[in-house]
Each structure stands twice: as structure tokens, then as C-alpha cells.
């Protein structure tokens, strides 16, 4: 495991290269509304599992057209009907089941108000969220980071997992928590904050491609173990 740091002086270049990929909001999606409402954020994150951002957007907008996005309504939805509405996001049967079940649990355990979970002591809140079906480490951290920021709850998905291993800042078999901790050490989040975490994620997705990483054009090639030959 290597102790390297993302050079702060690369932040402007990172911004210049990747800001064009930044999530584009629009009236129909209303991303600000999603981020401001923990339940909508949770549903959006479930819809984003194993699919692209454009498919997530389509599935969410389709859901929004048909249902009010709150636990009271979605807990009573018919999973088969719901799966048809969100089918553009893929894995629609599994996601529809998750959405209905998680909505029921929020109704039963928290009186329909997910904010109640988020008001628990910080050390308990993540564990409480993970009791909800379909909520794993990543989904819990997406929710928590939208409130407390990525410095506290850094989100690790497949892109972050892959780039951390290629950079060599974690071992191949590293756990979610080990990757999370290594990336929090690697990135100067005190300077760049959530914007830096987002831009770095775009680098991981678009340049550090799973099948064909574009190492020659990568900002990080000078410090990346993978680009210099594995293990070197
Ligand atoms: S140099 Fe290559 S492997 Fe390393 S982070 Fe960049 S794209 Fe990924």
C-alpha cells in the first residue's frame, strides 16, 4: 500500500478537463430537490445502482411523472407496475421491490420520515440506514455525504474502488472502509471539498476506464502504480 497524495496544483487542470461532464440539472429532474430530500435522494440512488447517469435520470423522471415520490405513496405501489415505470434504468424488478420495501420500512419504523434516522447520533445513523433493505455502504454514504459532505462520508463505488487499486493506495482485496479511508487521505478534500471528490470521480469514470484506461493522457500517470507497470 503506497502513501501518495493527489497534488493540489492539479486541481485547476482537473476542473478544466472534467467540468464539462458535470451533472446537468434541468427543471424536470430538479436535482436540487433530490439532494434536499433524503427520501428522494435514497430512491434516486437505488435507481442509479448498476446503470449510467442518463438511464438513472430517465427512470427517475418517469417515476416522478407517475408517482409522488414519498414513502406513503411508494409503500402502496404495485411492484409490477412500478417496475414498468422505471424499466429504462435496468434491473427494474429488483429496484421496484427495493423501493416498495424500503418505503414500507420507513413507514413502519420511522413514521414515514427518513429525516428521523438522520437525526440519530452520527455513529448510529449509518448502521440504522443499512438496516433498510437495498441500502448498503455506498447508498448510506451517498445519503450522508449529501448532508455532511464527502470529508465525513466519502462515497466509494466501482469507479472509486478501481482507481484506488490502480493507483496503488490500497491492496487488491481492500474492503469498502479501507478504500474509503485511503481515498480520504489521498485527496485534499480540505481544499477542494465535494467538488474535488466529484471531479476525481469523473476522472475515474471517463479516463480510468474499466477496460481501457487512458493512462497516456491521465493527470495522475506520474504517480500511478498501474501506469508504471503493476507492482513497480
Ligand atoms: S494513470 Fe491510468 S490507471 Fe492510473 S489513474 Fe490514470 S487512467 Fe487510471
Image (tube, rainbow, N blue to C red):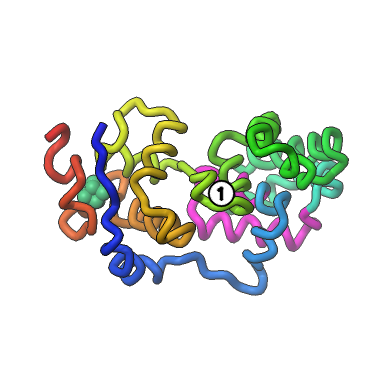
Count of marks, rendered view: 1
The question of residue 67 being in magenta is answered with yes
Residue 63 horizontal/vertical position (percent): 71, 56
Residue 31 horizontal/vertical position (percent): 62, 64
- The quarter of the image holding the N terminus is top left
Q: Is residue 163 above or below residue 67?
A: above
Q: Horizontally, is 11 left or right of 103 in the view?
A: left
> Which residue is pictured at 40% across the width and 36% down the height?
179
Residue 212 horizontal/vertical position (percent): 24, 48
- The quadrant holding residue 104 is top right
Query: Extreme top residue here?
Result: 173
> Which residue is pictured at 84% across the width and 49% down the height?
73
Range shown magenta? 43-69
Q: Main secondary structure of the magenta part?
A: helix
Crowding at dot 1, Cα within 10 Å, few <14 / some 14-19 / many 20+, comes out as many
* Res 134 seen here: no
Task: Tell me the residue that label 1 is attached to.
Answer: 48
- The quarter of the image holding the C terminus is top left
Q: Horizontally, is 221 left or right of 185 in the view?
A: left
Amino acid at each position: 500500500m503506497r502513501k501518495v497524495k493527489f497534488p493540489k496544483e492539479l486541481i485547476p487542470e482537473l476542473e478544466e478537463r472534467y467540468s464539462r461532464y458535470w451533472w446537468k440539472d434541468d427543471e424536470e429532474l430538479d436535482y436540487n430537490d433530490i439532494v434536499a430530500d433524503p427520501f428522494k435522494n435514497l430512491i434516486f440512488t437505488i435507481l442509479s445502482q448498476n446503470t449510467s447517469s442518463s438511464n438513472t435520470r430517465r427512470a427517475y423522471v418517469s417515476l416522478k411523472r407517475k408517482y409522488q415520490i414519498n414513502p406513503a405513496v411508494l409503500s402502496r405501489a404495485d411492484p409490477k407496475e412500478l417496475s414498468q415505470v422505471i424499466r429504462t434504468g435496468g434491473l427494474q424488478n429488483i429496484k421496484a421491490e427495493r423501493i416498495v420495501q424500503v418505503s414500507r420500512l420507513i413507514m413502519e419504523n420511522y413514521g414515514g420520515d427518513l429525516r428521523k434516522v438522520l437525526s440519530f447520533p452520527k455513529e448510529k445513523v449509518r448502521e440504522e440506514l443499512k438496516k433498510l433493505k437495498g441500502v448498503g455502504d455506498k447508498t448510506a454514504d451517498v445519503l450522508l455525504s449529501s448532508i455532511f459532505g464527502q470529508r465525513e462520508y466519502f462515497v466509494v463505488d466501482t469507479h472509486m474502488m478501481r482507481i484506488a487499486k490502480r493507483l496503488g493506495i490500497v491492496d487488491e482485496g481492500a474492503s469498502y472502509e479501507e478504500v474509503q479511508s485511503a481515498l480520504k487521505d489521498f485527496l485534499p478534500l480540505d481544499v477542494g471539498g465535494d467538488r474535488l471528490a466529484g471531479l476525481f470521480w469523473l476522472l475515474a469514470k471517463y479516463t480510468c476506464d474499466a477496460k481501457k484506461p487512458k493512462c497516456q493522457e491521465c493527470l495522475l500517470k506520474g504517480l500511478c502504480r498501474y501506469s508504471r507497470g503493476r507492482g513497480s
